[in-house]
Image: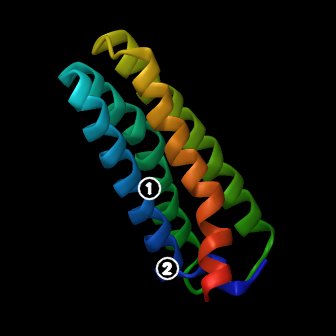
């Protein structure tokens, strides 16, 4: 992996692409029905917000430190927290707010796909 994958600028770019993705998906679903649009935004938030929290967590714990075993454990802890927050947000969206399943899942998946595809696209352009 290139060093640029770990840069703050790169992470912000990916987070912004994810934000734009789930807002656009939410707007498109809102054209069908407002509850579908809100459900899509909740699904996008369930993927985007944990990613943003993970990035903040990672930046705070790696600043000024050399790569050690501690960094690996910090990364693993951050990923575990990210998964837990994602699951809790999806449960709250579906259970408490009674979100519509299809737009919720499609927006969630679209944000995850951007997370996978964006690094390849950005690195090929750079």
Q: Is residue 104 visible?
A: yes
Which is more toward the observer, 72 or 44? 44
Report the quarter where the C terminus lies. Answer: bottom right
Q: Position of residue 52 (x, y in %)?
A: 44, 57
Q: Which residue is mark 1?
A: 18
Numbered marks: total:
2
Left or right side of 44 for 7: right
Residue that protrudes farthest toward the left in the picture: 34
Q: Secondary structure at mark 1?
A: helix
Which is more toward the observer, 105 or 73? 105
Q: Position of residue 3 (x, y in %)?
A: 70, 85
Q: Please name which of the two marks, 2 or 1, marks the residue nearer to the observer.
A: 1
Left or right side of 34 for 40: right
Q: Residue at x 22, y 21 (%)?
A: 33
Q: Which residue is mark 2?
A: 8
Residue 27's label in the rendered image is: none
């Amino acid at each position: 992996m290139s060093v640029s994958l770990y840069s703050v600028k790169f992470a912000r770019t990916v987070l912004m692409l994810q934000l734009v993705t789930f807002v656009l998906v939410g707007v498109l679903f809102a054209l069908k029905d407002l509850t579908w649009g809100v459900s899509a935004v909740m699904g996008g938030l369930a993927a985007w917000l944990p990613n943003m929290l993970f990035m903040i967590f990672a930046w705070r714990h790696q600043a000024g430190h050399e790569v050690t075993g501690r960094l690996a454990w910090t990364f693993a802890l951050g990923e575990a927290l990210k998964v837990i927050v994602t699951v809790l947000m999806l449960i709250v969206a579906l259970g408490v707010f009674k979100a519509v399943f299809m737009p919720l899942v499609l927006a969630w998946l679209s944000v995850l796909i951007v997370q996978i595809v964006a690094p390849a696209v950005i690195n090929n352009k750079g």
